[in-house]
Amino acid sequence: MRLSALSFLLCLVTSINALHFYLDANQKRCFIEELPSDTVVEGHYKALEWSEQQGKYIENDQLGIIVEVQEEPSGHVVVKTTGPLDGRFTFTSHDASDHSICLSTNYTTWFSHTHIRMNLDIVVGSTKADVEKDRSHISDLSGKIRDLNTKLEDIRREQQYQREREADYRDLSEETNARAVWYSVAQIVVLVATCAWQMRHLKRFFEDRKMR
């Protein structure tokens, strides 16, 4: 019963994004990932090329994959590398912001009609331990507890990111309120000066008429 409940909780807090998609030889596919600061991101991709002769997707050793990661909206390049058809990439986010993860092929000819099937797994958070290596040394329950601690750390990072965003919004709100207060004070000063000038002008006007 406890083991089943723990497995269900692990499924709820998982931070692994797995997907597959298709692209042409000269096409680039990008994905946006919202990351807190100081967060480790691991990616594993595998590309298969369509073979007209065999009528299926096959591995082609000449196929290379270009991985480019940028911070948005600054455009700062975090990762730019060319790897094999089955490879990995890792980076750490320095600031809390959106990150674009783009993949494309190393084919340069514009007339290529090659179709690529891409499998991509993205793990957001601290690097996971090698489960296969530890399986012979620890019980299944211990491994799941370790994974749960990793997910809880991911939740803590997400909460820290939300607190950073709330602090930015609070600073912006306080700055806006301060500007509004100074604007109101300036209006009052102008109004008082205008009234004083009008009173002085009217006083001189009536004094002149009285002397006449």
Image (cartoon, grey):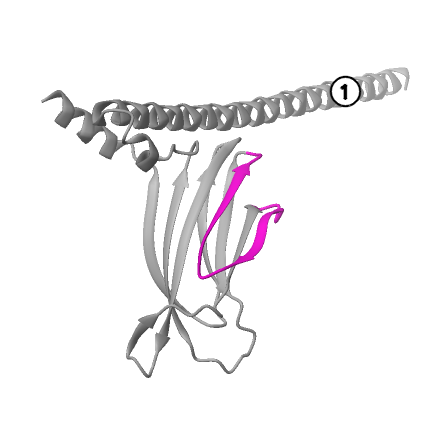
In the rendered image, the residue lying farthest to the left is 1
**Residue 211 vs residue 159, the one in the foreground:** 159
Range covered by the magenta-colored residues: 72-95
In the rendered image, the residue lying farthest to the front is 136
Residue drawn at (59%, 27%), measured in percent from left and top?
176
**Residue 198 vs residue 164, the one in the foreground:** 164
| Spot occupied by residue 87 in the image (x, y as percentages of width and height) | 45, 54
Residue drawn at (55%, 27%), measured in percent from left and top?
168
User: Is residue 93 part of the magenta span, yes or no?
Assistant: yes
Q: Is residue 6 left or right of residue 18?
A: left
Task: Identify the image quadrant of residue 150.
Answer: top left
**Residue 84 vs residue 111, the one in the foreground:** 84
**Residue 95 vs residue 132, the one in the foreground:** 132
| Spot occupied by residue 34 in the image (x, y as percentages of width and height) | 45, 40
Q: Is residue 128 left or right of residue 14?
A: right
Q: Main secondary structure of the magenta part?
A: strand
User: Is residue 65 part of the magenta span, yes or no?
Assistant: no
Q: Residues within 10 Å of mark 1 (few under 14, many from 20)?
A: few
In which quadrant is the N terminus drawn? top left
In the rendered image, the residue lying farthest to the right is 211
Residue drawn at (42%, 28%), measured in percent from left and top?
158
In the picture of the structure, the residue carrying the numbered disc 1 is: 193
Residue type at numbered disc 1? Ala
Task: Identify the image quadrant of residue 108.
Answer: bottom right
In the figure, 34 relative to 63: above or below? above
Residue drawn at (90%, 16%), measured in percent from left and top?
211
